Image (tube, grey):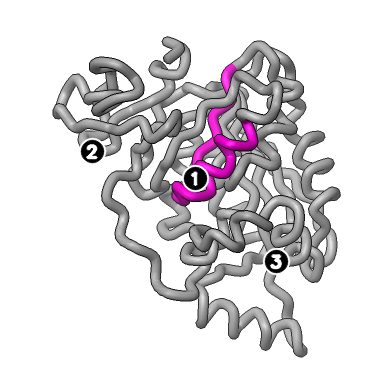
Amino acid sequence: MEISILEKLACPSCAGGKPAPQGPAAAGPALICSSCGTAYLNRGGILDFAGGVGRPRLLSSQWAMEFRPIISLYERVWRPLVTFPFSDLAWELETASKFLALSPRHDLLDLACGPGNFTRRFAETVTEGAVVGADLSLPMLRKGARELEASCVKNITLVRADVTRWPFAGTSFDRVHCAGGLHLFPALPEVFASIHRSLIEGGIFVGATYCLVDGGAKRKFQDHVSTAHGFHWFRPEELRGLAERAGFTGWEHRTRKQGIVFRAVKE
């Protein structure tokens, strides 16, 4: 395991200790916190910092992200089809790429990376820096690990992470990207604050999510999805407020249909 990756990790159990290697990477705990002794497993190349997260509620959004038939179709079928009524996946990727303004030596955290469909694209530019793909769904990450094995991309580390127990150190990344997760995260002010803390000065946070509409059949559908699946729809001013209260400046956003991609800067 590269030292550069270890420096970007922080123990979520004691919120300050540094995980360090213990024994062979393929067996037993991959890392143990130097302060509290909490062990974190290496699950086939995926560093598991989420621990014993309970099983998701049946038919919830997180349940869908761990349902193997959906995972097998997610990147090429499920995600494009689910996105299409509300946004445009190619537009999201193009806009996020412009906002991120990546260079080869940047260090990037791709939060809620799923199987790594955006992560791998970003890593084509970040050829000398470290790329970390983080997600709560272990089955999604395992699908991502198989995709990485079949590709030529070698600079991506996959981490199972719970955003409410942030496992990344301060000032560790030049860029943080999050698409497909903000509308499902609990405790959003804390998530924005954690992202801000983990960015270097001048670092950029780019997010993509979906906007609330004001009325009609689409609003009724949005209300139903919110009630049934805990899905949060945003107004642009709400996202901007979350970013500014976390300390971000330089707000900029683009919208298409109900999709929104935004950029915020840590100064």
The amino acid type, in three-letter code, at marker 3 is Cys
The magenta region covers 130-148
Would you say 104 lies left or right of 14 here?
Answer: right
Would you say 151 lies left or right of 226 here?
Answer: right
The residue carrying mark 2 is 13
Q: Is residue 43 above or below residue 33?
A: below
The amino acid type, in three-letter code, at marker 1 is Asp
Residue 173 quadrant: top right
Label 2, residues with CA under 10 Å away: few <14, some 14-19, many ≥20: some
In the rendering, which numbered label is found on residue 135?
1
x, y percent for residue 42: 35, 30
Disc 3/disc 2 C-alpha distance (Å): 34 Å
Residue 165 visible in the displayed image:
yes
Q: Is residue 108 above or below residue 20?
A: below
Q: Nearer the viewer, mark 3 or mark 2?
A: 2
Q: Nearer the viewer, residue 196 or 169?
A: 169
Q: Nearer the viewer, residue 4 or 2?
A: 2
